[in-house]
Amino acid sequence: MRFESPWWLLGLLLLPVVAWLRRRWTREATFVYSSVGLVKGITSLSRSRAGMVLRGLRWVSMALVFVALARPQSGEGKAPVRASGVDIAVAVDLSGSMLAEDFELNGERVNRIAIAKDVLRSFIEQRPSDRFGLVVFAGRAYIAAPPTLDHDFLLRNLTRLDTLNEQGTAIGSALSTAVNRLRDLPSKSRIVVLMTDGQNNSGNIPPLTAADAAKALSVKVYTIGVGTRGTAPTPVGYDPFGRKVYRQVPVDIDEDTLTQIAERTGGKYYRADTTKTLRSIYAEIDRLEKTEMETAKYASWEELMGYAAVPAVVLLVLEMLLANTVWRKLP
């Protein structure tokens, strides 16, 4: 279940405001008599609730119109889809050191996680035929998204990524987890892209052992050392004026190990000290061999707009009929 145009639902929040303004500014109709005695016989009559019912029909109709404009949809089911692409597992370091702000995005200083997510998002959007999986790691490795062609699902998971509240950087475990996500997929081109800004100091699997396993399974590994050279500004708090306070932290990337991992598997090591360099790895992946595969994904969506639009029209017509017949008001 999803809404294709969810911003229309904000209109539901405006309805109570419009109702309140209408009640505040609208004066009720009245008759002027020269003497109260002329209407003495009808002063005991109770007030009709017709107006309240008519207004209720109108407000419910308007609410259903906003729901219909938001275009509710439901997936009709899974269907096999053939695509030509590469199977790619991306392993992203989410340790605390990735909060260092030594990159720029759209003219603003951002941390390493933000730039990694932005570059990866652009790459995924440009390659709709590739099957992607997502692994995140700090002291341990976790599967954030299994290999899938459902890129909407993948990008939603990517958006939620943030630092993991644990110590250490388990490069070997992350690589092993990523390789295991690809081992049973029937494709000729299987790739791991591993991004980290530190050294392997956690986990039970040595990085080079994981690299040997990748080589045995014909998985090519591209490694990226993320971060400027020397030191990087890392936020440590805020001053009394609400501005970030930074501390220069040494950048400690194990480039030798990352290079060996890439070389053993037929990949390549990149040092990403600028946004341009970080993007360059994906340009090279574009030139890799592609293969046909079949997977299951939502092939189509059923429009549910009619379930809201039809009742809205019915209620609106009913309100007009009642207002001009049974509950017609005097002019």
Image (cartoon, rainbow, N blue to C red):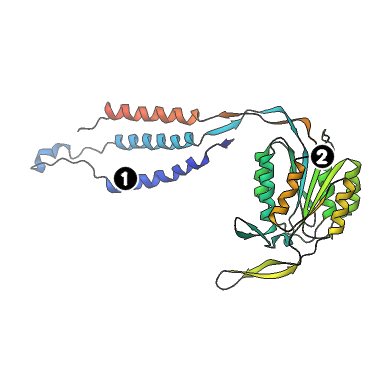
Dot 1: what SS?
A: helix
| Nearest-to-viewer mark from 2 and 1 | 2
Specify whether residue 205 is in view. no
Residue for point 77% across, 53% down? 195
Give the class, few, some or many, for how many residues have Cα within 10 Å of label 2's Cα (few <14, many ≥20). Answer: many
Which badge, 2 or 1, is on the more N-terminal residue? 1
Quadrant location, the C terminus: top left
Residue 298 placement, left or right of 172: left
Looking at the picture, tell me which residue is in the foreground, 320 or 5. Answer: 5
Residue 10 placement, left or right of 180: left
Quadrant location, the N terminus: top right
Looking at the picture, tell me which residue is in the foreground, 37 or 79. Answer: 79
Percent position (x, y) of residue 322? 31, 28
Dot 2: what SS?
A: strand
Give the amino acid at mark 2: Arg
Which quadrant of the structure image shows residue 124? Answer: top right
Give the amino acid at mark 1: Arg
Question: Exactly how many numbered labels are in the figure?
Answer: 2
* Relative to 309, residue 92 above or below: below
Residue for point 69% across, 55% down? 275
Q: Which residue is mark 2?
A: 190
Specify whether residue 302 is in view. yes
Percent position (x, y) of residue 185? 82, 35
Give the class, few, some or many, for how many residues have Cα within 10 Å of label 1's Cα (few <14, many ≥20). Answer: few
Residue furthest to the bottom in view is 240
Percent position (x, y) of residue 57? 37, 34
Which quadrant of the structure image shows residue 80? Answer: top right
Percent position (x, y) of residue 260? 88, 53
Cα gap from disc 2 to disc 1, whole angstroms? 63 Å
Disc number placed over residue 22 in the picture, else none: 1
Residue for point 40% across, 27% down? 314
Looking at the picture, tell me which residue is in the foreground, 254 or 139. Answer: 254
